[in-house]
Image: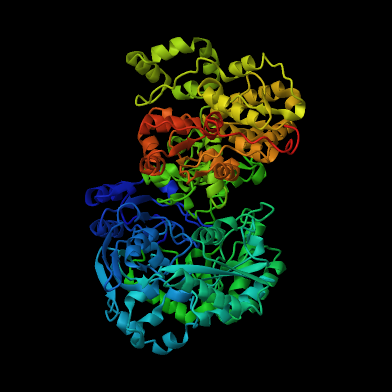
Amino acid sequence: MASGNALNGGTPDALVRELRASVGGEVAFDATARALTTMDASNYRRVPLGVVTPRDADDVAATLAACRAHGVPVVPRGGGTSIAGQATGTGVVLDLTRHLRSIVELDPASRTAVVQPGVVLDDLRAAAAPHGLTFGPDPSTHSRCTIGGMIGNNSCGSHSVAWGTTADNVHALTVARYGGDTLRLERGTEGPAGLRELVAGHLALLRTGFPGLPRRISGYALDALLPENGPDPARAFCGSEGTLGVVTEATLRLVEAPAARALAVLGYADESAAAEAAPGLLPFHPLTVEGMAADLVREPAGLPRGAAWLFAETGGATPAEARAHAERLVRAASADAVDAAVVTDPAGQRALWRIREDAAGTATRMPDSSEAWPGWEDCAVPPARLGPYLRDFRALLTEHGLRGTPYGHFGDGCIHVRIDFDLLTGPGVARFRRFSEDLASLVVAHGGSLSGEHGDGQARAELLPRMYGDELVALFGRFKDLWDPDGGMNPGILTRPARLDENLRFEVLPKKPVDVEFGYPHDGGDFSAAVRRCVGVAKCRTEQTSGPSVMCPSFRATGEEAHSTRGRARLLHEMLAGEAGGVITDGWRSTEVRDALDLCLSCKGCRSDCPVGVDMATYKAEFLHHHYRGRLRPAAHYAMGWLPRWLRLASPFAGALNALARVRPLAALAGRVSGIAPERGIPVLARERFTRWLNRRWGKGTFILSGDRIATLWPDTFTEHLSPEVGRAAVRVLEATGRQVLPAGRGLCCGLTYVSTGQLTRARTVMRRTLERLGGMLGTPVIVLEPSCAATLRTDLPELLPDDPRAAELAASVRTLAEYLEEYAPDWEPPRLDRQVTGQTHCHQHAVLGDAADRRLRERAGLSGELAGGCCGLAGNFGFERGHWEVSVACAEDQLLPAVRQAPPGTEILADGFSCRTQLAQLGGVRARHLAEVLAEGLDAGAPPQAPRSSGAGAA
């Protein structure tokens, strides 16, 4: 069967009609659905005909039957995090993540679980945890990868030294074949007709043709069909990459999870020393032996001394037992390691593991910001050969003029690496091929496997004859044909493969930078390079978050790929491809991209939480600017985007306008005209602007203190017109440090609302006017109380005005209140409040500003407890716009509102952002306060302010 979009005597319309008549789930052949599934986490891109989202096993069978009847290929797809291109295809993509997510049964007695293929690994682990059990394989994508995808790739993860690969933990599978018939696979069953005869005729080849190493993932596991191995067709099916059939149900083995864990972190002089030490730790039965070198680590993050590290996790029935186990490992390694640490604190362990788990994304950018790509992501060699292999690998990189950052499962001899291939030019792609061929030969020379975890896909299948020889590879083809005689299951993968330098996802992108408004300083000013940042690791698809993580609130609210950061990046990629082969051909005018970006809250969470720093808030503003250029905008863009102007005009009439807003018919009419959601209340205008109060307080700017005792406060729009009580409280706090407070100026605006609505020409005008008005105050530290305004000044200002040195100067001067107090009044002691807090860390503060200084200030004031992560859901103009109410509420219900409801009486509700406070008031009926207000109350209640012992770090 052809691997393209050929139909047997039919048309796509006929296929769609049949699918819609026989499938209960969604059938989508539109541009958006196709664009979202053109790529996985690999270098490859193939455009499908459409996407089917089956609701049950019957839908899977019906889809396979219809596609066979019409001669259309099928590609099963889980989380879409495959590294080698096997989750892309040209026919119908089966999205198994939406509905097939049931844990059918979990039996603690037999330690088994029966699950559907779309179950996310972390959901299974959470269900097993109350029974002291877990599923052993745990790839770094555990928060979004699916069991079906893990079976397809025979995934492993960091705990494979203890619990093996997915194939080691599969008991039985129910599989639907191309055409719709179903097979039950388990040890002792035969699989498709002719399989027993195929094995019996090639016993010698199957017994001698497979290298013996723990991470041999390449090819088909035909040795699992030998009589002495069961035979076990379920195990042979694992790692087949969607080329044999579709798993509709899996029975899995669970393992006992240690009650306590400790982490031994061992530092070595270099990665080869770490690699050579790793096998020596295995006799101590650690749960993990992971390795990485210093060129992967952007921040030391508590690592012991060294240029490379091993992470050896240990378990025990008690924390003391786990720690003792880890200390034994450290003693055993002491002869080779240059330093070591044992970490028992769960938070400390999570912080260290995050460095390792984010590596698949982090490694895509070199320290100099140049791009690096997968392709040779997970070769494996016998663990005892890992040290020599790494030295030869580094030499091969140098020979080809390439750079890479190895890391991975050192205890299993499996190395991950992203390499700075030039995949944009003909000579660069040719070098990619030469290096791939040479590396395949090197891996085989060390007795290894081309794939040690993520499968062969299109990246490596072409080179399998180097590893297995032509005779065994031909046997792979016969095995595939017994399962799929029509060749409809994921053609071009594993057998009769496409070339490794075909279907590269960069081929269709513009060859020259497109004309854009932002500077994109980390991407060389190239919007295409910014969009290329998304490599598809899909951390944005994590549905359950804990701690401070923000990304991606709209995906968690809707569960739709189009509303994930990755989905939006895919749509932008196809938009940029345009007439060169993209699915979306109307460029900046695309309604598909507009609709996907409509539910982006511009929270900026991806800027910090995405391992590669995708900044969808900026991309959204860029797109909206071009999309609406020369056209009428939505009413909310004029109402909310021009909010600073309207508030300045309304300020003299605040009392009358507040009274009119309380008249429901008038408020409803105003909301309809301005595009505001009818469920929203209109915020109350301040009767006295903050700066008016401040000038009146000090006699219209007559100051008596010297310049080094003056603190400059930015009069942001929200503090100035809507919550001046926050500004007054900040003044009280700053005065307690011995400062006198001066407003930064009159009529200043950071441009936030213009940026968030994509009115970038106007934003630039406003920003330049602000810089002019600041004049000689530029360079003076300026305190910004509203986190969203501070973030705009820190990032959007210099990125919209990259050629204006004043923009960078102002950006560098911005301080939050906590940062200012820590830097310029380090000896001041805040009032001791001793109370519990909850509330919201503003998403822009999390993503751009950081909250470390705020945490330290709260601790010094005796404010204990954690603030919620995520996004409040109001997000500036987003939650006010018509059509966003339900998503706005869902975002608030994700973390913020539950945290407030569960807080004990007397808990202080903190929210520095005006949006966060408004959301809490309108949805939760609670009054949240800025940290400045709480501190000021403590001062005014009689907690004696501590006079500063010195004048601080310098002029303010």
Q: Is residue 653 left or right of residue 482?
A: right
Location of the N terminus by quadrant is bottom left
* Residue closer to the observer: 592 or 872: 872
Residue in the picture at 63% in, 31% down: 736
Seen from the viewer's position, the closer of residues 635 and 745 is: 745
Is residue 495 positioned above or below 588 on the image?
below
**Picture coordinates of residue 60, whole percent (x, y):** 28, 58
Residue 782 is left or right of residue 682, and the answer is right
What colour scheme governs how the chains and residues are painted in the rendered image of this protein? rainbow
| Residue 38 horizontal/vertical position (percent) | 45, 51
Report whether 563 appears left or right of 933: left
Q: Is residue 466 visible?
A: no
Residue situated furthest bottom in the rendering: 204
Work out whether residue 813 can be spotted: yes
Q: Quadrant of residue 658?
A: top left
Pinpoint residue 275: horizontal percent, then vertical percent. 61, 75
User: In this rendering, is residue 106 above or below 615?
Assistant: below
